Structure formats: C-alpha cells, structure tokens
Amino acid sequence: MSAQLPIIRVRDLTVGYGRRAVLEKVSFDVYPGEVFVILGGSGCGKSTLLKHMIGLLRPMAGQVLIEEQDITTAQGEARRTLLARLGVMYQSGALFGSMTVLENVRLPLEEYTDLPLEAMDLIARTKLALVQLAGSGSMLPAELSGGMQKRAAIARAMALDPPILFLDEPSAGLDPITSAGLDQLILRLARSLGVTFVVVTHELPSIFTIADRVIMLDKSARGIVAEGNPHVLRDTSEDARVRQFFNREAVLEAV
C-alpha cells in the first residue's frame, strides 16, 4: 500500500460540535483498493469523523483531501463533481420507504446524469445484481429484511461507480450470519471492482474479516491511539486501550 499515493489524505483534522472538540489534529491516509476501518468505543467520534470525510460537516480545522481535492472547502460544481466520486451507505440504510428498491438505487443517476430512463434502470438492476438482489427491484424497502436493505443501500452507493465507498456501521442490527454474509460481499466488491472502502464499525468479527488496515479512535485521547493491521494490533500492541478493545477485556473501575 505504501508504494501508492493515498486516495484520501486527512491532515490535522479537528472536529466537534460548538466549541467542544471531539477529535483533535487527526491525520491518516487511505490507499486505493484497501478496506480501511475506523473503529473504537462508543462516543469516540467514529461517525463524526466519517461525516466530515464525506463533506456533511465542516471541521474546526484541518483538511480532508479526496484525490488531492479538499472536500472541506470545495464549492459549486467542483464540490458536486467531488461528491459524485463518493458512495455512502448510512447506518440505517436510509432507503426511501415510498419508493421501490430500483427507484432508490436509481436516485443518484437521476441527480448526477442525463441518461435516459431505460439506461438508468439497466444500471440500477446491474448494481442490484452485484449485491445479490437481482429481481428485488420492484419491492418496497419495508418488504426487505434488514440485511437486504443494507445490500440495497450499498447498490445505491455504487450507482455512479465511485472509486470510494463509505459504510457507516454496516453490521448494526444484523444477526451474526447475515453480518458475515455482508462482510463477504464487501470483500468481494473490494477485490473484484478495486473499490476503496472506508468502514466505520466496532464489530470485532467484521473487523478481523474485512480490514486491511484500521485506525482506532479513543474518546479520552480525542484522536488515534493505534493504526495498522487488526490482527497485529491485537497480538502485539502495548497500549492497554488497544488490548482491551481487541480482546474484549472489561475495564474495571475502582470503587
């Protein structure tokens, strides 16, 4: 990975709400084609970091460079072009309940292209087939299982063939078998399409299955306390916080 230029560069990023910083001066790189996982305990800033990386929130300071363009300052057509290079699957799936699955997947194409309806439908069906939902296009989201809704949301995120996909807690609310199937889908898409994945999760089985590299955020540190391969971090880290997370060790507080 290190021989390649990063597809994402985060530099000295400070983020928070109001005047309260959640993360301070965070820096890291994401390389093309890797599955990069952002992990950590509850309240450490994982989803907040992701929202800044996709341009939903403005940082207090720092940069998020997507293919060398700063998403924190991009405006107008430059911002629109940059956003089209990103696909996002939100934690809940965020499918529109009054629209069919096909219509949901077609939405980015309607927003960003001038393709005829027949072409957009063909692309949407192709994306649904990639996530093993061929034939589900006419269904409403409420008719799908939780795992199928997550797959449909990934298909929508892929509609414009973005080089980067962001997934926020993809396994949340899923049973272990469904979650494992979603992990395998992520790996298959990453390897077959060469897509870069940035995944926010705290689910250890998923982390050990899909992650090429991780960063671990810590609430008290307001930043990154570990970076690397999760198996190596689990087995060799000398940081107690990292060992506790990867080995599911409870932190006992003195009374």
Image (cartoon, rainbow, N blue to C red):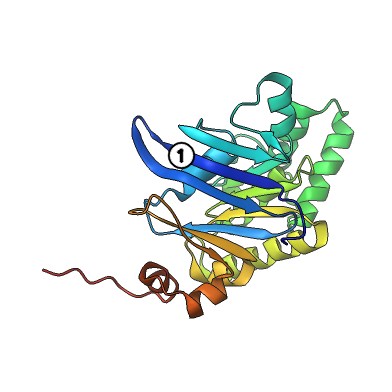
Q: In terms of depth relative to the viewer, which is nearer, 167 or 21?
A: 21
Q: Is residue 203 above or below residue 12?
A: below
In this figure, which residue is indicated by the disc labeled 1? 14
User: Badge 1: how crowded within 10 Å, few (<14), some, or many (20+)?
Assistant: many
Residue 96 shows in this picture:
no
| Left or right side of 7 for 14 | left
Q: Is residue 20 above or below residue 136?
A: above
Residue 145 lies, in percent from the top left, at: 58, 56
Which residue corresponds to the image point at 19% horizontal and 68% vertical from the top-left? 253
Q: Secondary structure at mark 1?
A: strand
Q: Is residue 13 above or below residue 46?
A: above
Using the rendered image of the protein, determine whether residue 18 is visible from the camera's viewpoint.
yes
Is 46 displayed left or right of 33 in the figure? left
**Residue at 44 percent of width and 38 percent of height:** 15
Q: Quadrant of residue 238?
A: bottom left
Specify the quadrant of the image occupied by residue 242.
bottom left
Asked if residue 157 is positioned above or below residue 146 in the image, the reply reads above
Residue 241: image location, x then y, percent: 37, 67
Q: Tag 1: residue type? A: Thr
